[in-house]
């Protein structure tokens, strides 16, 4: 088990620095050069795709992504098919579900595209979905958004807005085969509570690139659960900023990267407001040749964000030879007046010695592997708090494991 | 009565692109209720014997037989050997992140016993076994061997020995790296299991120290990949006084 861990000191301008290099026989931890969130972007955030150069692949933000597998989402050659990707929204009573035009004032409020594909999606979508939970409405059933691909290409935009003190759970389920670029905005009013579960359960060929923007109101809490199992290439960019003090964000992620899959999660928590909290936990298991998981965790504590409390962690479990992990936590602290800040990244390998140890205690090989993977994910799954999703995840993990035995 | 029979066992290992023979014809019979100490200098092949019996994939059996109650052990997979009643307490127990001790113990006991132990009696059984080994209850919630001290790892091995109740227990340098207190606690654990009379014990050690706590019925001197002398407990006293020198002449490295 090779591990690289680091925890920052809080009195320097840039705490932490790159984690120490560590690697296993197959997995590896890449280390980013000293760089800040801002300098790592090829262009300032913009809604206009023309403001971004076509990436060539050596940019910091693109260097892990196989551009040739993006099906033209990055260079303007992907064309929406109109059909072939269905979006269905099921919402309990009291929720407003609308389809609106590009000029609707509610679009793009939670964040601005930070890379060319997000800007492409914003520049190219025709209709946007807006789901509104009125203030003080507490839903007892989840809102379910099913995105099902039947071979189409789609540029999407979805807004989910909760009024003050509203509470909701939203499950966004991606299945089938599609090429999808999208922006999803989560706007939380004061004191609102939103849990979003985004499941990427795509077929093997799908390409999915999306930016998730959460804007968290005063004393509001946002929980994001990103679950990525499928797809040829999935690149998600969950981002959080705060509109008022007392906001809390929990960003959980779980991925199971199989042979040939590229699954990339790039997070940013922008502590731009005092007295807010964030907690990021992403865990991934990898198996098979050329399984590639990328995790970038950026946490920025701005000078004005006194009283910030943040922690981010990424753990990876490499189950077979031939898989690769790039995990880059990055914490930038512009004020020392904070409650806490930390980050950790570790990549471990389920190796022959662990297998031998468990088998030497009578446990069959497939059961040993299940034991390790279940244990690895269990704590995270328990934090999701949406029962049917937890059950489905555990089933899905079992199914992924079956594939290895 | 359970009997482990090792006959003319030859084992090789691949190292630096070469095949090296480590065990060169080991003969040994361990019966239920007996305690055999295998003593020998470093590099004599003691640990290879232990890991070969447990079925570690690193070692290749090139000759000889191993049977447990007449069943061919060498035909069995690692987990089958454990379920057949072989137990190896490892010199270097492996960390298994993400798997708690309590989950591990229960999964293991379920596999060995063929059915899940009843929860209430199981919890009590584990708790009492841990108390006897001076293990804090919080131990059960830690991940297997992760961050354990040397002494904790060995106690955890003996905890498994007590819970899994094997027919034959191979203790590979269980005494190494232990201070006197830990050695006493671990030895008492081994003795509790031995006193049931239901386990044959193969105690592999470099030092005579542990034999003050665990009295062997037989002592075998291991050198150059085979047993070169066997005797009773008095042989250990001789080794204590004279060391292994008499056995290592003739080119076997100490």
Image (spheres, coloured by chain):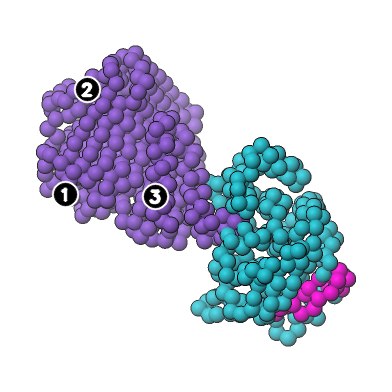
Chain colours: A purple, B cyan
Q: Are marks 3 and 1 on the same chain?
A: yes
Q: Nearer the viewer, residue A362 or B51?
A: A362
Local secondary structure at mark 2: strand
Asked whether the viewer can see residue A214, the reply is: no
User: Is residue A287 shown left or right of residue B179?
Assistant: left
Return the residue found at the far bottom.
B250
**Is tag 3's residue or tag 2's residue first in the polypeptide sequence?**
2
In this rendering, position of residue A373 left or right of residue A300: right
Give the labeled residue for mark 3.
Answer: A400
Residue A299 percent location from the top left of the image = 39, 36
How far apart marks 3 and 1 lie (CA) works out to 29 Å
**Are the residues under marks 2 and 1 on the same chain?**
yes
Answer above or below: position of A162 versus A224: above
Q: Is residue B49 above or below residue A368?
A: below
Q: Earlier in the sequence, mark 3 or mark 1?
A: 1
**Magenta residues, as a range?**
B219-241
Badge 3 sits on which subunit?
Answer: A
Crowding at dot 2, Cα within 10 Å, few <14 / some 14-19 / many 20+, comes out as some
Which sits in the foreground, B54 or A207? Answer: B54
Mark 1 neighbour density, 10 Å: few (under 14) some (14–19) many (20 or more):
some
Q: Residue at x 46, y 58 (%)?
A: A24
Mark 2 sits on what residue? A97
Residue at figure coordinates x 40%, y 40% from the top left: A393
Q: In this orientation, does residue A83 appear?
A: yes
| Label 2 with label 1: CB-CB less than 8 Å | no
Q: Residue at x 28, y 16 (%)?
A: A94
**What residue is disc 1 on?**
A72
Task: Say which element carries label 1.
Answer: loop
């Amino acid at each position: 088990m090779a591990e690289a861990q680091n925890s920052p000191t809080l009195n320097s301008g840039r705490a932490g620095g790159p984690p120490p290099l560590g690697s296993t026989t197959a997995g590896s931890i890449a280390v980013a050069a000293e760089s800040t969130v801002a300098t790592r972007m090829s262009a300032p955030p913009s809604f206009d795709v023309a403001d971004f150069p076509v990436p060539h692949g050596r940019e910091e933000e693109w260097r892990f992504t196989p551009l040739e597998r993006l099906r033209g989402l990055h260079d303007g050659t992907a064309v929406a098919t109109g059909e072939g990707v269905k979006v269905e929204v099921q919402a309990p009573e009291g929720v407003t579900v609308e389809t609106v035009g590009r000029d609707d004032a509610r679009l793009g409020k939670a964040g601005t595209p930070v890379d060319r594909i997000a800007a492409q999606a914003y520049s190219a979508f025709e209709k946007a979905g807006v789901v509104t939970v009125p203030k003080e409405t507490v839903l007892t059933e989840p809102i379910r958004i099913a995105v099902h691909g039947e071979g189409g290409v789609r540029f999407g935009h979805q807004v989910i807005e909760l009024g003050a003190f509203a509470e909701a759970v939203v499950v966004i389920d991606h299945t089938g085969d599609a090429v999808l670029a999208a922006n999803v905005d989560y706007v939380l009013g004061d004191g609102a509570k939103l849990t979003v579960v985004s499941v990427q359960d795509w077929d093997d060929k799908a390409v999915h690139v999306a930016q998730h923007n959460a804007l968290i109101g005063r004393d509001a809490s946002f929980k994001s659960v990103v679950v990525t199992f499928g797809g040829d290439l999935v690149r998600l960019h969950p981002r959080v900023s705060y509109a008022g003090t007392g906001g809390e964000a929990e960003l959980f992620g779980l991925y199971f990267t199989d042979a040939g899959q590229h699954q990339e999660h790039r997070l940013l928590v922008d502590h731009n407001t005092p007295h807010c909290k964030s907690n990021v936990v992403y865990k991934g298991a990898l198996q098979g040749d050329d399984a590639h998981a990328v995790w970038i965790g950026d946490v920025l504590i701005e000078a004005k964000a006194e009283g910030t409390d943040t922690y981010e962690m990424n753990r990876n479990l490499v189950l077979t030879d031939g898989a690769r992990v790039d995990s880059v936590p990055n914490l930038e602290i512009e004020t020392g007046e904070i409650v806490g800040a930390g980050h950790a990244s570790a990549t471990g390998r389920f190796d022959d010695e662990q297998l031998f140890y468990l088998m030497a205690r009578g446990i069959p090989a497939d059961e040993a592997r299940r034991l390790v993977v279940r244990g690895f994910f269990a704590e995270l799954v328990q934090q999701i708090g949406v029962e049917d999703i937890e059950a489905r995840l555990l089933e899905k993990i079992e199914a992924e494991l079956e594939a290895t035995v | 009565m359970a009997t482990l029979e090792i006959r003319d066992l030859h084992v090789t290992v691949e190292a630096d692109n070469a095949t090296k023979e480590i065990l060169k014809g080991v003969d040994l019979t361990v019966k239920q209720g007996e305690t055999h100490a295998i003593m020998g200098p470093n590099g004599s092949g003691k640990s290879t014997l232990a890991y070969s019996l447990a079925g570690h994939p690193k070692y290749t059996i090139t000759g000889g037989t191993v049977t447990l109650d007449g069943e061919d052990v060498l035909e069995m997979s690692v987990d089958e050997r454990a379920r057949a009643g072989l137990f190896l307490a490892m010199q270097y127990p492996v960390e298994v992140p993400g798997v708690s001790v309590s989950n591990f113990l229960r999964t293991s006991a379920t596999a060995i016993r063929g059915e899940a132990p009843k929860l209430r009696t199981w919890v009590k059984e584990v708790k009492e076994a841990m108390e006897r080994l001076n293990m804090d209850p919080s131990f059960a919630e830690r991940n297997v061997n992760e961050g354990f001290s040397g002494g904790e790892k060995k106690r955890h091995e003996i905890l498994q020995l007590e819970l899994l109740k094997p027919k034959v227990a191979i203790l590979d340098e269980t005494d190494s790296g232990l201070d006197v207190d830990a050695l006493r606690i671990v030895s008492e654990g081994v003795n509790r299991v031995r006193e049931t009379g239901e386990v044959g014990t193969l105690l592999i050690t470099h030092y005579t120290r542990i034999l003050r706590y665990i009295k062997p019925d037989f002592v075998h001197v291991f050198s150059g990949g085979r047993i070169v002398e066997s005797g009773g407990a008095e042989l250990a006293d001789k080794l204590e006084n004279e060391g292994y020198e008499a056995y290592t002449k003739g080119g076997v490295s100490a």
